[in-house]
Amino acid sequence: MKKITTEASIENVNIVTEFVDEHLESMDCPMKAMMQINIAIDELFSNIAFYAYRPDKGPVTVSVEVVENPAAVIITFIDQGIPYDPLATKDPDTSLSADERNIGGLGIFLVKKSMDDITYEYKDGQNILKIKKNM
């Protein structure tokens, strides 16, 4: 397992994406899966950057774990910000037009739909969100 810790600032999303991509490339991750993972990273890291420590800043640790048989990658986001379970949020009604829908929730909905597994727990003062993508 490899990990990186950086400030939860929107400017650092590229650092985290490049860190994860480096590990995905080393395992010959299919391009479609890599793109889905990058979108998930952007959404999840951005939410942490904008909301976890508001109005202050704080650290976020992102780890990458490669699993074999079956091949998969697990990416974990850990922050000490305000407890927040994004999985508890009701999915948006995508049958409504954009004008009729409530604002928010679409990003985490896309993450849920594109990842093979997603879990959240609040433990020891930390938000721990894991996403898993099968290769």
Image (cartoon, rainbow, N blue to C red):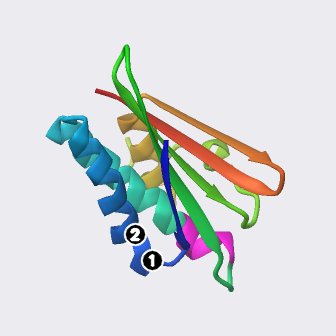
Taking the spot 37% from the left edge, 27% from the top edge, the residue there is 72
Residue 16 x %, y %: 40, 63
Q: Is residue 19 left or right of residue 104?
A: left
Residue placed under numbered mark 2 in the picture: 13
Residue placed under numbered mark 1 in the picture: 10
**Which amino acid, mark 2?**
Val
Taking the spot 39% from the left edge, 45% from the top edge, the residue there is 110
Tag 2 and tag 1, C-beta contact below 8 Å: yes
Is residue 100 in view from this perspective? no
125 within the magenta span: no
Q: CA–CA distance between discs 2 and 1?
A: 6 Å
Residue 93 x %, y %: 46, 44
Q: Nearer the viewer, residue 108 or 36?
A: 36
Prevailing secondary structure class for the magenta stretch in the rendered image: helix
**Which amino acid, mark 1?**
Ile
Q: Identify the element where label 1 is drawn.
A: helix
Q: Magenta part of the protein: which range?
A: 48-53
Q: Is residue 38 left or right of residue 11?
A: left
Residue 74 x %, y %: 46, 37
Q: Against 131, is 77 above or below?
A: below
